[in-house]
Amino acid sequence: MKSVILASFLFLLAEYSFAEELINYIITSDSQVNTLEGGLEAIGNVVVKRTKDNFEASSDKLTYDNDTKTLKLFGNVFIKNLESEGLSIEETSGDELTIFTDTGLFEFKSQNKNRVTTKIKF
């Protein structure tokens, strides 16, 4: 009986561990280069899709820094279906987007006196 209870506990523990797995992204671009530190750079016609939902982004360039857990998109950034901390963004565009992959939070910037434009769904 003890072994059945122990086995059930270990099974539930394993299920809980898998539930907390990282968010996965699919990145398509003209070229991609990885670094020894676990970083990535994608250049040209970059398209990013998240496997858990309908999030999609496009830009001229993307970098991923494994140390800071940041995914950065540069140049002509366009985003669809971005969910973060209860905020649902249908569409947004700007010059530079940073997604903190460990928390899901983001920061959107615009440069050269351009503006960030966002369509939010409440």
Image: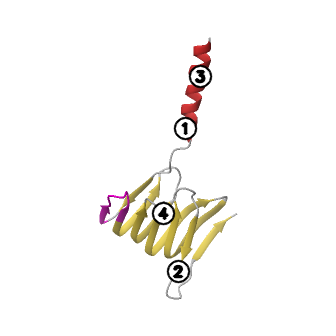
Q: Nearer the viewer, residue 35 or 72?
A: 35
Asked if disc 2 and disc 4 are in contact, CB closer than 8 Å, the reply is no
Q: Nearer the viewer, mark 2 or mark 1?
A: 1
For badge 3, the amino acid type reads: Ser
Taking the magenta stretch, the answer to whether it contains residue 33 is yes
- Give the Cα separation between the discs numbered 3 and 2: 52 Å
> What is the three-letter code of the residue carrying label 1?
Ser
Dot 2 corresponds to which residue?
110
Question: How busy is the neighbourhood of tag 3: few (under 14 within 10 Å), some, or many (20 plus)?
Answer: few
Q: Would you name the residue on which mark 1 appears?
A: 17
Distance between the Cα atoms at labels 2 and 4?
18 Å
| SS for dot 2 | loop
Distance in Å between CA atoms under marks 1 and 4: 23 Å
Return the residue found at the far bottom.
113
At mark 3, the secondary structure is: helix
- Give me the C-alpha separation between circle 4 and circle 3: 37 Å
Question: Does label 2 or label 4 sit earlier along the sequence?
Answer: 4
Nearer mark to the viewer, of 3 and 2: 3
1 and 3 marks in contact (CB < 8 Å): no
The residue at the point 53 percent across, 80 percent down is 110
Q: Residue at x 52, y 49 (%)?
A: 52
Image coordinates of residue 9 in percent, x first then y, are 60, 25
Distance from Cα at disc 2 to Cα at disc 1? 38 Å
Q: Which residue does the numbered mark 3 point to in the structure image?
A: 8
Residue wearing tag 4: 70
User: Residue 89, how many percent across, how many down?
Assistant: 61, 65
Q: Nearer the viewer, residue 106 or 35?
A: 35
Tell me which segment is drawn in magenta.
30-41
- Which amino acid does the dot numbered 4 rest on? Thr
Return the disc, 1 or 3, that comes first in the chain's sequence: 3
* First along the sequence among labels 2 and 1: 1
